[in-house]
Image (cartoon, rainbow, N blue to C red):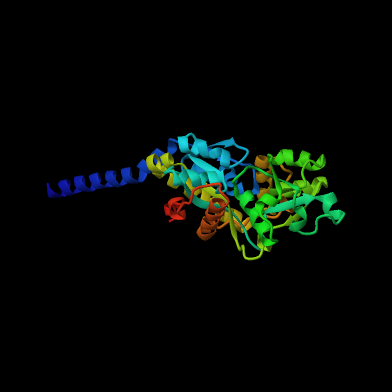
Amino acid sequence: MASKKTSGKKMVWALAVALVVLLPAVARAQSETVKLGDLAAISNAAIYIAVEKGFFKEQGVNTEITNFDSAAKMVPALVAGELEVSVGSASAGLFNAVAQQAPFRIVADKGQTREGYGFSLLAVRKDLVDSGQVKTFKDLKGKKIALLAKGNIQHYLVGKMAEEVGLTINDVELSFLGAPNQVTAFETKAIDAAYAVEPWAARFQERGVAVRFRTPDQVKGLGPVQVGVIIYSGKFIKERKPVAQRWMTAYLKAAELFHSKGTKDPEIAAILEKYTKVPAKVIQAAIPPYQDPNGKLLVENLADQAQWFARNGMQQKVSIENAVDLSFLK
């Protein structure tokens, strides 16, 4: 009789263990959709890789991608919870929203500039460089420089380049254009320079309209710059935290793969071609971003960006600790 009771207890325990093992798998089988705002750029490689290699699918996540012209334009959708994940850069709009108690947070690295990884750079019209009219940034005083949007990382970096040679951001004329339109603007000489993110600089060079001129690592005292970031909406963090963690797990698996292989790898270049619509050969010729394989952020540089925007009247002062959430990387 005792042996039957013992046998029954063992069976119950075995069933309990089986349920513990199977329930997460069943839950993941019911794929969760995550809405992501995208900017077509090489630094988004880890996201595209995670989609194409099935890393999101492994985590029971379906990433639904919507394209935007700039990260700044995604901020309202993040605040409203219409987007759950945003790719792009920190911006005055983002920091302002945080200062006003918006709940979204920067959660992971998406691309950094440092020596050998100047994927975010200033391009100058080829005829101006060839003729010797533009030799240093100082020669761009009064000239028209295109950015994707006001108050974004490009605005900060052009400002830093201006300050290095004794100018201010107000000494140049800024024009706000999407990357595809910048190609046409160079061809028609409507702009003199553009702050570009690869593969657009490679595209400019391929078309013979502009040349790579200066990268952030060449700016004295600037150091590595946090250009690309992953941002989670407050609603995603609060209401779907397990899904947010699974999304991050897939993303970091892809980030590690991209870190080890890079843009020269034919498979990676083909994936990037599919999402950016830029030929693989151009992508392979582009300057790659540095991608931290663990998603680690350059928090000190993000703080410098926030301070620069505040000094230039684009945002309220904000504590960087209120803008980041590193918990999903642990």
**Left or right: 158, with 307 as reference point:** right
How many badges with numbers are in the image? Answer: 0
On the question of residue 199 being in view, the answer is no
Query: In the displayed image of the protein, which residue is found farthest to the bottom?
Result: 221
Q: Is residue 165 above or below residue 178?
A: below
Viewer-proximal residue among 194 and 59: 194
On the question of residue 85 being in view, the answer is yes
Give the image location of residue 72, x and y in percent: 57, 41
Query: In the displayed image of the protein, which residue is found farthest to the left?
Result: 1
Tell me the residue at 67%/61% (across/down): 164
Viewer-proximal residue among 198 and 12: 198
Viewer-proximal residue among 125 and 86: 125
**Left or right: 235, with 114 as reference point:** left
Give the image location of residue 240, x and y in percent: 40, 40
Query: In the displayed image of the protein, which residue is found farthest to the right?
Result: 131
Q: Is residue 2 above or below residue 188?
A: below
Give the image location of residue 73, x and y in percent: 57, 38
Give the image location of residue 30, x and y in percent: 43, 35
Q: Quadrant of the C terminus?
A: bottom left
Viewer-proximal residue among 242 and 102: 102
Q: Is residue 197 above or below residue 28?
A: below
